[in-house]
Image (cartoon, helix red, strand yellow):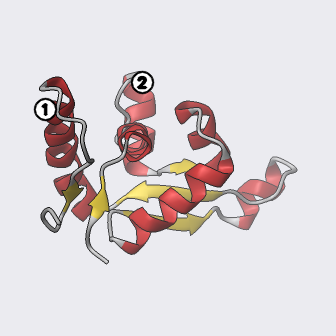
Amino acid sequence: MSEVKMTPHTQTVLRAMMGQGGDSERRRMALSHGLYGLELSKITGLPNGTLFPLLERLRQAGWVERYWEQDEIAESEGRPRRRFYKITSKGSELAPQALAAATSTTAHGTLARPGLAGGGLR
């Protein structure tokens, strides 16, 4: 699966994962280490039932990778491990173009159907 449907939720998640709309420190952390699930939920305002299936679709498309935090970090803070999500090089390359196209489409009032990024229109 290489196509990503650019729904408003997808756009929100991609912007968060690229650190857009945050301070420079959050941007640096998002790009270098990724963001964990609860953090992404808080940033985007999306419920888990919307967020995690969307992250899985982005992962399957190769735009996002996921990994578990090291046990030692979680243990030192007395909490369970966190699963982090980080934008991939493919996602870093394609997401800005897809977001720009989606923004352009909505700015021109063409909201009939979200476009597909990374694979063309159907």
Badge 2 element: loop
* Amino acid marked by disc 1: Ser
The answer to whether residue 57 is left or right of residue 75 is left
Which is more toward the observer, 61 or 90? Answer: 61
Which is more toward the observer, 87 or 5? Answer: 5
Badge 1 element: helix
The answer to whether residue 26 is left or right of residue 38 is left
The part of the image, by quadrant, that contains residue 2 is bottom left
Q: Residue at x 67, y 50 (%)?
A: 48
The part of the image, by quadrant, that contains residue 117 is bottom left
Instruction: Find residue 35 and report its horizontal and vertical position in percent.
Output: 53, 47
Q: CA distance from mark 1 to mark 2?
A: 22 Å
Q: Residue at x 72, y 55 (%)?
A: 73
Give the crowd class for mark 1: few <14, some 14-19, many >=20 residues within 10 Å: few
* Residue marked by disc 1: 104
**Which label is found at residue 22?**
2
